[in-house]
C-alpha cells in the first residue's frame, strides 16, 4: 500500500500520517512491530473504521514476520478500537489465511489485498452514491469518512467528491465533530485540498441549518452496521439522523460491505467504545472544564435503521427494509470473490 497517508515500505515498516496533528502539521509515524501498530490505532494516529482494519492487517503480517505468537498479536490488535468492525473483520481474514499454513509473505500479500479491495470499494461506492445527491444544494457530513479514513475517495466524503466531479453544485456543511474534531481538523482539510465548497459549523448548528432549508441531504460513514440496518457511527450521528427526519431530509450511510456485521442482530448488540474523558474536558491540550469534573465519552452512537433512507456500499445501494437487502449485498460480494478464485 502506498497512499498519501499510509505506506508499507521495503524496510518492512508501516508509515502512517499522524492524524492527531492535522491540519497543523504533517508528521509521519513509523511502526516496526505489531505493538507499534496497536499503539497507533489506539491513540488515533490512524482512525476511521476501514483504515483501522488495513493497519491491523499489516500489524498481523508484521507479527508473522517477526515470529511473534499470532494469537496474542490478534488479541492485542483486536482490543484497540471495539466499535469499528472492520478491525475484527480484517483480523479474521488474516487469521484464516494464517491457519491454512501460509508464509509470512503470503500474509503480507493478504494485507495488501485487503488494502486494494478497500480502495476499489471506495471508488465504486462513491460513484454509486453520487447519484443520490441533489444537483445543487447543501450536504451535511459528520466526523471524517474521507480519504484519510480509508483509501482513495473514502466513503461519505467520497460520495460527495464524486457528485462534485459530476458537476453537481454542492456546498458541504462540515460538523466540527466534538470531542476529537475530526470534522474541523480532517474533513475540512480534505475538502479544502480538493477545492470542494464547504462551510464548517459546530455540531449544535446542524438543526438550525436544516430548518432554514440549507441542507438537502446528510451522508455519513459507519463503524458497524447491524443486520437490521441499525448503524453505529461517530457520536452525534444519531442526533443528526433524528433532526434530518424531522426536517424531511434524506439521511444516507456510505460504507464498504466490510463494515456490515450480520452477526449483530440490531444496534443494541453493537459494542460502544468508551474513550478517555480527557478528550472531553480539554480541546487540543487546553483544559476547558473545572478540574475533577465528572464527564463521559462514548465515542459512537447508534442510529436506528428507521432514520436511514439508504445504505450505500460498493456492492450496491440497500433500501429499507434493510434486513434482506444487506444479506443480499454480502452474498453478492462472496459470490464475486468465489468467481475470482
Ligand atoms: O473515532 P474515529 O475517528 O475512528 O471515527 C470515525 C468515524 O466515525 C467514521 O465515520 C467511520 O469510521 C467511517 S470512516 C470511512
Image: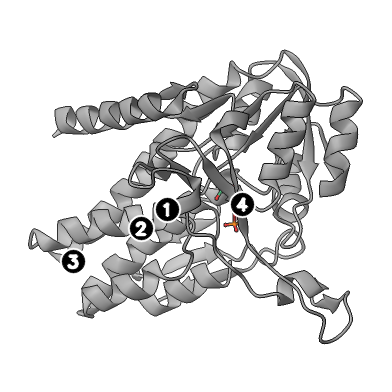
Q: Which residue is mark 2?
A: 88
Q: Foreground residue, 104 or 335?
A: 335
Q: Foreground residue, 25 or 229?
A: 229
In the figure, 88 relative to 172: above or below? Answer: below
Where is residue 20 shown, x and y percent of the image?
A: 66, 66
Q: In front: mark 1 or mark 4?
A: 4
In the figure, 173 relative to 171: above or below? Answer: below
Give the mark nearer the N terminus: 4 vs 3: 3
Q: Which residue is mark 1?
A: 85
The alpha-carbon separation of the residues under discs 4 and 2 comes to 19 Å
Q: Residue at x 67, y 43 (%)?
A: 238
For label 4, count other residues whose C-alpha is less than 10 Å away and answer few (under 14), some (14-19) or many (20+).
many
Q: Are marks 1 and 2 in contact (CB under 8 Å)?
A: yes
Q: Is residue 335 left or right of residue 175?
A: left
Q: Foreground residue, 156 or 208?
A: 208
Q: Which residue is mark 4?
A: 301
Disc tally is 4
Where residue 281 sits, quadrant-wise, is bottom right
Q: In front: mark 4 or mark 2?
A: 4
Q: Is residue 224 left or right of residue 95?
A: right
Amino acid at each position: 500500500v502506498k497512499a498519501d497517508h499510509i505506506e508499507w515500505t521495503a524496510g518492512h515498516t508501516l508509515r502512517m500520517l499522524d492524524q492527531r496533528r492535522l491540519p497543523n502539521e504533517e508528521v509521519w509515524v513509523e511502526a516496526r512491530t505489531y505493538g507499534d501498530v496497536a499503539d497507533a490505532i489506539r491513540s488515533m494516529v490512524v482512525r476511521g473504521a476501514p483504515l483501522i482494519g488495513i493497519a491491523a492487517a499489516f500489524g498481523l503480517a508484521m507479527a508473522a514476520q517477526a515470529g511473534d505468537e499470532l494469537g496474542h498479536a490478534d488479541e492485542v490488535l483486536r482490543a484497540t478500537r471495539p466499535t469499528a468492525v472492520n478491525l475484527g473483520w480484517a483480523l479474521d481474514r488474516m487469521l484464516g489465511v494464517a491457519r491454512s499454513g501460509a508464509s509470512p509473505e503470503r500474509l503480507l500479500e493478504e494485507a495488501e489485498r485487503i488494502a486494494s479491495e478497500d480502495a476499489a470499494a471506495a471508488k465504486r461506492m462513491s460513484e454509486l452514491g453520487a447519484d443520490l445527491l441533489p444537483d445543487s444544494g447543501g450536504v451535511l457530513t459528520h466526523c471524517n469518512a474521507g480519504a484519510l479514513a480509508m483509501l482513495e475517495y473514502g466513503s461519505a466524503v467520497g460520495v460527495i467528491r464524486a457528485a462534485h466531479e459530476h458537476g453537481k453544485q454542492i456546498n458541504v456543511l462540515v460538523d466540527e465533530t466534538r470531542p476529537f474534531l475530526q470534522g474541523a481538523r480532517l474533513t475540512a482539510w480534505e475538502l479544502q485540498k480538493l477545492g470542494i465548497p464547504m462551510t464548517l459549523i459546530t455540531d449544535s448548528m446542524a438543526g438550525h441549518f436544516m430548518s432554514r432549508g440549507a441542507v438537502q441531504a446528510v451522508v455519513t460513514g459507519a463503524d458497524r452496521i447491524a443486520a437490521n440496518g441499525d448503524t453505529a457511527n461517530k457520536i452525534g450521528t444519531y442526533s443528526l439522523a433524528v433532526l434530518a427526519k424531522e426536517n424531511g431530509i434524506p439521511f444516507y450511510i456510505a460504507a464498504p460491505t466490510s463494515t456490515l456485521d450480520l452477526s449483530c442482530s440490531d444496534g443494541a448488540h453493537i459494542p460502544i467504545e468508551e474513550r478517555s474523558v480527557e478528550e472531553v474536558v480539554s480541546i487540543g491540550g487546553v483544559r476547558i472544564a473545572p478540574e475533577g469534573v465528572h464527564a463521559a465519552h462514548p465515542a459512537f452512537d447508534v442510529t436506528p435503521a428507521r432514520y436511514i433512507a439508504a445504505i450505500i456500499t460498493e456492492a450496491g445501494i440497500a433500501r429499507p427494509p434493510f434486513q434482506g437487502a444487506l444479506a443480499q449485498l454480502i452474498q453478492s460480494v462472496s459470490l464475486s470473490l468465489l468467481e475470482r478464485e
